[in-house]
Image (tube, rainbow, N blue to C red):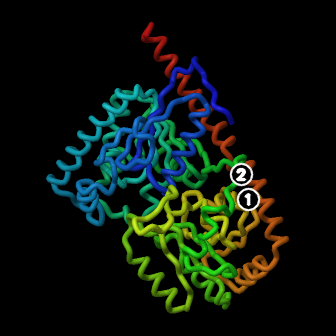
Amino acid sequence: MTKRVNNNLKIRNIGFISTRFKGTDGVSLEAEKWASVIKRMGYECYYFCGLSDRPPERTMLVPEAFFGHPKIKNIQDQCFKVYRRSSELTGKIHSMRRLLKHAIYNFVKKFHIDLIIAENCLAIPMNVPLGLALTEFIAETGMPTIAHHHDFFWERPRFFVNAIADLINMAFPPGLHSIQHVVINTQADRELSYRTGISPTVIPNVLDFKKPSPGINHYNSDLRKAFGLKEDDIFILQPTRVVARKGIEHTIEVISRLKDPKVKLVISHSTTDEGDAYAKRIEDYAEHLGVQLIIKPEIIGDKRGRLKEGEKIYTLWDVYPHADLVAYPSTYEGFGNAFIEAIYFKKPILVNLYSAYIRDIKPLGFKAIEMEGYVTDEVIEQIRCLLKDSKTCYQHAQTNFEVASRFFSYEVLARKLKNILMDFEGIVEAIELQKGPR
């Protein structure tokens, strides 16, 4: 797709708002894909967040918008795992809400924002004051808003016990007339409708399948060596964070049962906001089963570069071409970026039957090794056969690529976004006509 410049657009400047737009987390990656497609449609994109790797001249950086900011973390720690909050905590929340709302007003004014895209900050209460601030801003201004929801608080047990039910009901998500809600799977569509009466649009996560996937090149040719792997080792990649719902213990069990010392497991990401207890658990489990577990997140970044010691930093796109099998045994996913990425790189895939996969991905006809909650002898035999049979691997990869190109491409995203944005164009035009000449 080429960029289209349309001088008749009533909406010109679009502001993305989230806790962060930086790194390789799912929200940051999907926001960048949306921005890429939106820019090709003729709109300009700007960013409001607490952490950013977006163009500085198009970004308003407000440290308190980041969920890891000390003041926000202090508030969050007092909001959950308890049922009552103090008046002091309520005061802290609203003081921070006012600060962030004022910053959002400044952002909209500075960049002449016509429409907001809220990336997950109105879905999951990672930063309660930010969600409240944005909700109040939308209520006060009627700003056209697309609320792009990746996961909700009711999908995360750590948010079940809380002292802020009133605030969660207000802002996560808010039911305001100027918001068009977008979810990434049909289960989220049903749950949101059932719980709130909101009717969202379903837009799955996507990739640019018209752009050839990167391969092994002069920069990443030494990647196996960087991970301590030999050229003839069998490289199983699990491209996920080290958190419990990613099911890393299943991949460890698979490797143990393959009984081949050449099979090695690489985890691409580290722990983030969910602690390190699970990381310790899988390290102990891997040691107990005699599986070589390699976790070196310091050499995998969102951009190529070098550490202070001189060691190379690779991107995830450098890692995928080297993998012999991609393992994705998650027990829960909002959609499944790693599944689509493995298809993009034409790799065989082991996948657990998580709900979004069952409802939205499996019926489309993908070829994958499937496990249903636990590893079986049949799963192990399928992996053995597939690793030995390059012809079948190739056929499956081609089929998967063709299916994904039809259902999870940038072109699909462009069509769905165009419908939403054109609806907002009509609303803005009607409002302007009522106001008279601008």
Q: Quadrant of the N terminus?
A: top right
In the image, what residue type sits under mark 1? Pro
Taking the spot 46% from the left edge, 30% from the top edge, the residue there is 115
Q: Quadrant of the C terminus?
A: top left
Which residue occupies the extreme left position in the image? Answer: 88
Question: What residue would you read off at disc 1?
Answer: 363
Taking the spot 51% from the left edge, 55% from the top edge, the residue there is 303
Q: Quadrant of residue 203?
A: top right
Q: Is residue 364 visible to the viewer in this orientation of the structure? A: yes
Residue 370's x, y, as percent?
A: 69, 72
Q: Is residue 432 left or right of residue 404?
A: left
In the image, what residue type sits under mark 2? Pro
Disc sitting over residue 212 in the figure: 2
Residue 54's x, y, as percent?
A: 45, 44
Q: Work out whether residue 168 or residue 21 is closer to the camera in this orientation and state it.
A: 21
Q: Is residue 179 visible to the viewer in this orientation of the structure? A: no
Residue 354's x, y, as percent?
A: 60, 66
Check disc 1: other Cα within 10 Å, few if <14, some if 14-19, many if 20+. few
